[in-house]
Image: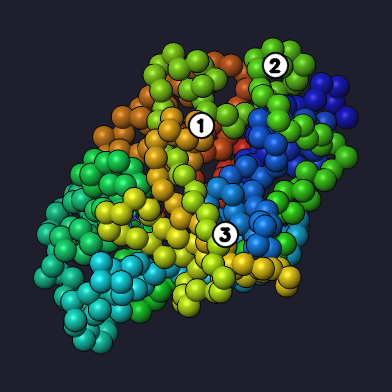
Amino acid sequence: MNTKPILVVGAGFAGACYARTLAEAGYAVTVIDSRSHIGGNAYDEIDHNGNRVHRYGPHLFHTSNEQVVDWVKRFGEWTPYEHRVDAQLADGRLVPLPVNRTTINTVFGAALSNDSEVEAFLRRLAVPCESPRNAAEHLYSKIGIELTDLFFRPYTKKMWLMDLEEVDISVVSRVSIRHDTEDRYFPNDKFQIMPKHGYTAIFSNIFDHPNITVRLSENFNKAMHEDYLHCFNSMPIDAYFDNVLGELPYRSIKFHHRTQESAADWKCSVINFTDARAFTRETAWYLLPHHRQPDGTGYSHTLEEPCDYRDNGLERYYPVKTADMRYQKIYKKYAELADELPYITFIGRCGTYQYLDMHQVINQSLMGAEKWLQRR
Ligand code: UDP
């Protein structure tokens, strides 16, 4: 056992991966989190209706990375689950999202019957653009103006408070465009699973190691560096440096919970509202596997209303990626400052200012921890 312990700031996936890997390598690890619970934004809990609710919005696990899956499976049982989303049209009809053949046939009253017909149809709608510079040009070149303005423009505006012209392509290309009838939200991922007993239970098991101490409701302060060999820190990197180079903005979400007396007759657990109403989507929690307890009473739903993180108690959920990369450029300068400090490594969504999914955070963090161990 090494003499000085390691400090991990943040008990979400990034912190958990670092803590567990370093603990297994023989280091004593202290994990602190300013919140009163483990799990970061993946935290879930059983609500008053006996439904499992993800406190910070639906977390669907998907990846093609076998090592990531093998790792998370060490810490609990997972159950297969392929996520599907419906988008609600102005007239109330529901259509699959990703935009696929069914979506296109419904919207245009068409009868396209195979991939090549859809391809030809979209080619007629598309606004050709050799090298798209932003989300609008990208989407117009793939699906044309009408579909873009129906499914992406108002949703993106309320989500990011920006027009598609200002948003980076990588943000909207998280959602695929299909020529077939594939309606899974993550069609390209080999593994699509959910923790059978919730994410929080997975985190409890990850932290359940004799070398790991977890302290909740505790804020980081720089004096802590004295007592630790190294600090892996998932706090916002701009906040660590007292915003000296400017602020890195985030979008946040206000969650509105409601209870239904009976189960909704939905095909999917999530419905997206792609029009201009304030909410972006609604989750019916009990439609996710193992999310309703046998003795559950009501049926829990959550609506999401995007907002600036400053209007939501500084809850940072989504780093903002504009087409001109202005915030990524500021982040890079913070990362250069951090490189000067040999005793700290910034990790996770807020530490690296990246719009990362769970599997990407896990992959980066496991690799980062291994690399750090190799360098010692
Ligand atoms: N998006 C959209 N309409 C939709 C779904 C997504 O315009 O119905 C755009 C929007 O800009 C959103 C991005 O695609 O922020 C990524 O969507 P995703 O569902 O991956 O967002 P997340 O689940 O991370 O909130």
Residue type of the residue flagged with mark 3: Phe
Secondary structure of the residue carrying numbered label 3: strand
Front: mark 3 or 1:
1
Among the two numbered marks 3 and 2 on one chain, the one whose residue lies closer to the N terminus: 3
Q: Residue at x 73, y 72 (%)?
A: 294
Compared to residue 52, the image places residue 330 above or below, namely above
Residue 229 in percent (x, y) is at: 75, 21
Color scheme of the displayed model: rainbow
Q: Quadrant of the C terminus?
A: top right
* Ligand 1 shown in quarter: bottom left
Write the residue at 66% across / 35% down. 35
Tell me what residue is drawn at x 88 percent, y 30 percent. Answer: 1
Residue position for label 2:
225
| Label 3 sits on residue | 61
- 323, above or below 244, in the image: below
Query: Which SS class for mark 2?
Result: helix
Measured as percent of width and height from the top left, residue 228 is found at 75, 20
Q: Secondary structure at mark 1?
A: loop
Label pair 2/1, CB-CB below 8 angstroms:
no
Q: Amino acid at mark 2?
A: His
Q: Is residue 327 left or right of residue 24?
A: left
156 and 348: which is toward the camera: 156
Amino acid type, callout 1: Gly
Q: Is the shortest distance between ligand 1 and the CB of mark 2 under 8 Å?
A: no
Q: Earlier in the sequence, mark 3 or mark 1?
A: 3
Label at residue 313: 1
